[in-house]
Image (cartoon, grey):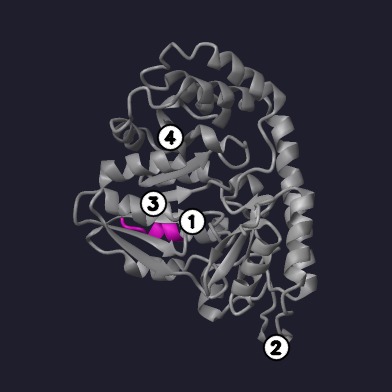
Amino acid sequence: MDIPVLHRLALNESPYPPLPSVRRAMQRAVAQAHRYPQFHPDDLTERIAAWCQVTSDRVMVGSGSVGVALQLLRTVVRPGDAVAYGWRTFDAYPLLATMVGAHPVPVPLSPDGHQDLGALLAALDHRTRVVVLCNPHNPTGSLITADILSAFLRQVPRHVTVLLDEAYVEFARHSALPDTHALLDSHPNLLVLRTFSKAYGLAALRVGYGLGVPDLVARIRRQQLPFGINAVATAAVKASLRAGSELRRRVDAVVAERERLRHGLLDLGWRVHPSHANSLWLHAPDPVDEGAMALTAAGVQARHYPGEGLRVTIGSREANDAVVAALASVGRPEASDRRAPNAPADEAVSAYLRVSG
């Protein structure tokens, strides 16, 4: 018999539905569903630009951040070029690379779940047109700090565009979080991706945006699908931007639950590195496959990478308690097999990447 899913914690969705003010804006837009949206989302672009305190020629809006990523690849990649990224990462990136005829170049993560920036730099060659960084990283929640990111960007050849995916940046609380707005002025080959799917809870409406220098943004906009952002999504984003303080409180609540869940799992013996996203990463050699089965039996849907890890989205307090209860039933990982949660994997990694809780 199929076990019903009680808690959906597999896709890093927000545990909260849209705010009442956002729902009202969506309902008003639905009443005008017989009218087309703007040919290109100029009004929304200007609103996002004002919110980001940049000029509108630095903003590109698309169908989720993945839509903007595809438009970038279509702009700068030609068949036979290469796209490099740390692996494991967001599943869409190898798919997008193949969609534009590029060769995906996956570079293994470091043992403690960070993107190996030294190995990524070594993987770049004359064929490489794009290198993807996720910060915070998906699925491990690790962070590239400001000094490390700056050093990396200085070493990337100018013919390579850096796609910096910041889908989870609202959940990061690190004191050395990069100032990507400042980096854009120094690196014309940088495009920063953001989304309204995660912190803003609008995953089903598919709105994301990119920030870059005007020349790069203008080239990407040529790939924009006419009428590509629907009116309900536009209304929801505009209303969300007006409700910034309410949404920040929701994000703070998710961050507090993330830390509560992490410490609950540490108490059970699971090794869980600090996360800067809205999820936690449980990884081998801890018994992640057995953990996945226990979660499924408890009606908890998490993202399982067999033999590799478990990504558990931060849900409601009830959902997070269900995770702890389910994983408490799994054999406690042996203490001798565990690495201290904040310890670097080796000297080479610690030289490149540092994270604190």
Q: Which residue is mark 1?
A: 150
Residue drawn at point x = 41 percent, y = 14 percent: 36
Q: Which residue is mark 2?
A: 336
In the picture, the quarter occupied by the C terminus is bottom right
In the picture, the quarter occupied by the N terminus is bottom right
Among all residues in the image, which is located at the extreme left? 79
In the picture, measured across the screen, residue 343 lies left or right of residue 163, that is right
Give the label, 2 or 3, closer to the camera. 2
- Alpha-carbon span between mark 1 and mark 3: 12 Å
Q: Amino acid at mark 3?
A: Val
The secondary element bearing badge 4 is classed as loop
* Depth check, front residue: 105 or 176: 105
Name above or below for residue 55 compared with residue 299: above
- Residue 156: say if magenta: yes
Q: Earlier in the sequence, mark 1 or mark 4?
A: 4
- Residue 202: say if magenta: no
In the picture, measured across the screen, residue 8 lies left or right of residue 93, that is right
- Alpha-carbon span between mark 2 and mark 3: 40 Å
Q: Which residue is mark 3?
A: 162
Give the label, 4 or 3, closer to the camera. 4
- Tell me, yes or no, whether the two marked residues, 1 and 3, touch with CB atoms within 8 Å: no
Dot 3 crowding, Cα within 10 Å, few <14, some 14–19, many 20+: many
The secondary element bearing badge 2 is classed as helix
On the image, the x and y values in percent for residue 195 come to 52, 39
Query: What residue span does the magenta drawing correspond to?
Result: 152-160
Q: Earlier in the sequence, mark 2 or mark 3?
A: 3
In the picture, measured across the screen, residue 51 lies left or right of residue 207, that is right
